[in-house]
Image (spheres, helix red, strand yellow):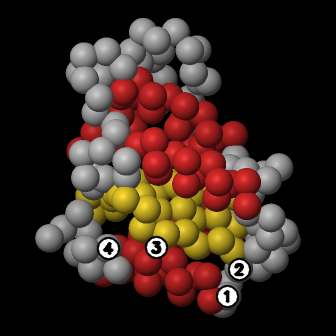
Amino acid sequence: MSKKIVILNGSPRKKGNTSALVQAFAQGAESAGHTVTEFFLDGMKIHGCKGCFGGQSSRACPCVQRDDMKEIYPAVRTCDVIVLASPLYYWTMSGQIKTALDRLFALEEGDGNLLRGHGRASALLMAAEGSGFEDALLYYNHLMEHLAWENLGHILAGGNENVGDIEGKPEVSAAYELGKSIV
């Protein structure tokens, strides 16, 4: 059965190492008959969460702020899988993806929780110069537990100092296979 997959790409580089993982994952998922929608977060206008608790999950745009999250909310509402893709910045995910994740909280507010559970699954794709992914994994695993999403796994590609360093590495093939393996 075809799945709707949303990729939140938190890299600032459209052709960087994280984006190479995203591209491979998407190709694998599409080869298995799934629909993939990628949001390149760095190219979007997304404000930080105000912590106002004013969201209403049933509204078309559940957050009180009006910005490019209006494009992401409907896709997340109807998707089966959410892929979080980010470079490793200061031992965790990038600010771009963290900002979008914080704003997804509006789907948990008000008159219905449209984010937690609902049979969703997630995967994590990360690239980095180093290899200290522990804190990012800890956050991701806590997030999966809180949201009650199935954790499909993660691809963590260290040792990629320059753009393009990831080419030909096994993590790119692993990202393709992870996308293809979604059932």
Numbered mark located on residue 115 in the image: none
- Are circles 1 and 2 on residues that touch, CB within 8 Å? yes
Residue 97 visible at all: yes
Q: Between tags 4 and 3, which lies in front?
A: 4
Which amino acid type corresponds to the residue marked 4 in the rendered image? Ile
110 vs 145, left or right, is: left
Which amino acid type corresponds to the residue marked 3 in the rendered image? Phe
Counting residues from the start of the chain, the first of labels 2 and 4 encountered is 2
Residue for badge 1: 169
141, 86: nearer the viewer: 141
- Are circles 4 and 3 on residues that touch, CB within 8 Å? no
Dot 1 surroundings within 10 Å: few (below 14), some, or many (20 or more)? few
Residue for badge 4: 182
Residue for badge 2: 166
Separation of marks 1 and 2 at Cα, in angstroms = 6 Å
Residue in the image at 55% along x and 31% along y: 102
Separation of marks 1 and 3 at Cα, in angstroms = 14 Å
Q: Residue 56 appears in which quarter of the rendering?
A: top left
